[in-house]
Amino acid sequence: MKKPSKGIVMGILFLGMTMGLASGYGAGVISVSSAAFKPNDHYMASLNWYAYANQAYFDSGYPNSGYMEAPVFLPNLATVTGFVAVVTDNGTGPDDEIHVSLRRQNIQTGMSEILASVYTSSSFALASRQTLTDTSISNAVVDNDTYTYSVLVRFYIPRSYLRLHGVKIQHWSVL
């Protein structure tokens, strides 16, 4: 029996790898631009808010927290392995915090669950961008048949020095 030539083996290997990449198999990242975020209620929409490709923020103080939200489109049955938010928190007061969470909403019941969450500390001000990471993901397997997914940002007290720059959702897909 003849041995397969090296070229045929390499061709089969290349084809298998290409098909694997084309089918979405392996590690992936979904990025959410800060331009996708908008206030999630009419009180927030009446404030001065900005959502550009490089940052989203409120520039006026509101006596309560300000919220922005963006939809996320994750591959069905993928496993979320990491959640990363890039923010700027240049505030030093006790109310200067920014919280970012990956959430899912049950389509039938409307119930929401937090899958991952990161936040800054009010005692730690930095004028430069900070990368916040959460790798302990609850309900990590994506179920698009039952849930929709979104990222919610809570500006503890809306100020222009609390800014969201973007979000990355790391996942592993077997389909």
Image (cartoon, rainbow, N blue to C red):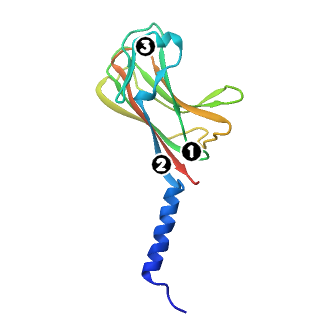
Quadrant position of the N terminus in the picture? bottom right
With 43 as the anchor, is 76 left or right in this view? right
Query: Which element type, helix, strand or loop, lies under badge 1?
Result: loop
Spatial separation of the CA atoms under disc 1 and disc 3: 34 Å
Q: Marks 2 and 3, how far apart in space? A: 34 Å
Secondary structure found at label 3: loop
Residue 135 numbered mark, or none: none
The circle drawn on residue 157 is 3
Q: Residue 112: x percent and y percent?
A: 63, 27
Residue pushed farthest bottom?
Answer: 1
Does residue 85 show up? Answer: no
Q: Nearer the viewer, residue 36 or 98?
A: 36
Q: Which residue is mark 2?
A: 28
Q: Tag 3: Cα neighbours inside 10 Å, few (<14), some, or many (≥20)?
A: many
Q: Residue at x 33, y 17 (%)?
A: 92
Q: Could you tell me if the residues under marks 2 and 3 are in contact, i.e. CB atoms within 8 Å? A: no
Q: Residues within 10 Å of mark 2 (few under 14, many from 20)?
A: some
Residue at horizontal 48%, vertical 71%? 13
Residue type, mark 1 in image: Pro
Crowding at dot 1, Cα within 10 Å, few <14 / some 14-19 / many 20+, comes out as some
Q: Earlier in the sequence, mark 1 or mark 3?
A: 1
Residue 172 visible in the shown view: yes
Q: Does residue 10 lie above or below 32 as drawn?
A: below
How many dots with numbers? 3
The image quadrant of residue 141 is top right
Residue 166 lies in quadrant: top left
Specify the amino acid type for callout 2.
Answer: Gly
Q: Amino acid at mark 3?
A: Ile
Q: Which residue position is annotated with label 1?
A: 75
N-terminal label among 1 and 2: 2
